[in-house]
Image (tube, rainbow, N blue to C red):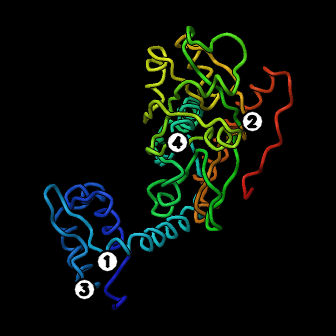
């Protein structure tokens, strides 16, 4: 391929068409006319000797080569944008930045209220755009640039990513007030005698409880699996199911819906809510501001919890590898 036939604007067109799946919407995104984008696509097709985008009902879809090019093109454009951004100071009061963040439902419920409040005050022209992300797709979405940050209970990332830990959390079991296990502390025998409700946005049937309960000789039985925490209260109120999950979600839910909260009768590792980003964003001013803001909000939550419990908050990781 002859590199002299390419320029940066062609790569921007490629990125926009890939993201939008539609030539006209890509033109609107770039502030160009539809013929201009079509002309740029023709130059790209000639340069790569590939159709790149094929017409389908409702738009276009990428060819096999375009899918392979997506990551390298995104990385190249991100590198250029980062280089340009490093020359400019970031002023949150005037920035019209879009912060694309991937969050698990737990992270969204715990951190989004304070994050939106903070950005509304400090970066009123910025847009916080959150999409669901979990341990199965977070790293892929960071690689392809769909999101800039991933927050949730996530696996250890490879070296091209940086992770910091934000919050520790315990587990709480919820049930209806009239449940047969409502009185007294939970025992393993009683806890596993009743079916359990599992919240699993990605559809998996393994939860944090399963391995410890199986190791203790009391495996649990699932009675239902749902995709969202919003379904939990009415299900529990109308059944003898038990649902165990993050205490930061479970305790407010119990208070709001009249559910009973109990400590599970098995030792569980604390859930660790973390934040991961691609190292290509390490020095990006807007990205750095957002990371530090999220860390400060998480620290404030932890200090509030510690004050309520009369204890000192745990040590914090700095903004870097952990």
Left or right of 60 on screen, residue 207: right
- Nearest the viewer among 102 and 156 is 156
Report the Cα–Cα distance between label 4 and label 2. Answer: 24 Å
Left or right of 166 on screen, residue 22: left
Left or right of 34 on screen, residue 200: right
Q: Where is residue 264 in the image (x, y as percent from the top left)?
A: 68, 27
Please name the residue that numbered disc 4 is placed on. Answer: 104
Report the Cα–Cα distance between label 1 and label 2. Answer: 49 Å
Please report whichever mark, 2 or 3, sits nearer to the chain's N-terminal start. 3
Q: Position of residue 77 (x, y in %)?
A: 45, 69
Please report whichever mark, 4 or 2, sits nearer to the chain's N-terminal start. 4
Report crowding for label 4: few under 14, some 14 to 19, many 20 or more residues within 10 A (C-alpha): many
- Nearest the viewer among 278 and 82 is 278
Q: Is mark 4 on a helix, strand or loop?
A: loop
Please report whichever mark, 1 or 4, sits nearer to the chain's N-terminal start. 1
Location of the C terminus (image quadrant): bottom right
Report crowding for label 2: few under 14, some 14 to 19, many 20 or more residues within 10 A (C-alpha): few
Q: Position of residue 128 (x, y in %)?
A: 48, 41
């Amino acid at each position: 391929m002859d590199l002299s036939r390419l320029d940066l604007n062609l790569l921007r067109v490629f990125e926009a068409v890939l993201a939008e799946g539609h030539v006209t919407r890509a033109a609107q995104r770039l502030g160009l006319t539809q013929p201009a984008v079509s002309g740029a696509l023709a130059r790209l097709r000639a340069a790569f000797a590939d159709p790149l985008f094929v017409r389908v009902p409702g738009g276009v879809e990428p060819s096999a080569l375009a899918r392979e090019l997506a990551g390298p093109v995104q990385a190249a454009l991100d590198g250029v944008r980062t280089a340009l951004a490093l020359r400019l100071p970031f002023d949150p009061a005037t920035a019209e930045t879009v912060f694309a963040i991937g969050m698990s439902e737990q992270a969204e419920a715990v951190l989004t209220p304070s994050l939106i409040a903070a950005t509304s005050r400090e970066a009123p022209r910025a847009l916080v755009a959150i999409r669901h992300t979990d341990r199965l797709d977070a790293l892929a979405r960071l690689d392809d640039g769909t999101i800039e940050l991933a927050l949730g209970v996530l696996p250890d990332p490879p070296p091209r990513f940086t992770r910091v830990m934000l919050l520790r959390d315990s587990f709480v079991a919820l049930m209806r007030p009239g449940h047969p296990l409502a009185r007294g502390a939970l025992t393993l025998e009683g806890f596993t005698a009743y079916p359990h409700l599992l919240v699993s946005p990605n559809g998996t049937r393994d939860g944090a409880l399963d391995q410890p309960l199986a190791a203790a000789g009391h495996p649990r039985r699932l009675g239902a699996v749902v995709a969202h925490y919003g379904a939990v209260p009415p299900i529990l109120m109308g059944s003898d199911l038990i649902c165990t999950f993050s205490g930061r979600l479970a305790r407010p839910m119990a208070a709001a819906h009249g559910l009973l909260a109990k400590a599970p009768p098995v030792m569980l590792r604390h859930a660790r809510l973390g934040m991961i980003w691609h190292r290509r964003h390490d020095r990006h001013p807007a990205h750095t501001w957002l990371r530090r803001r999220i860390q400060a909000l998480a620290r404030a939550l932890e200090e509030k919890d510690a004050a309520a419990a009369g204890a000192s908050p745990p040590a914090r990781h700095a903004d870097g590898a952990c």
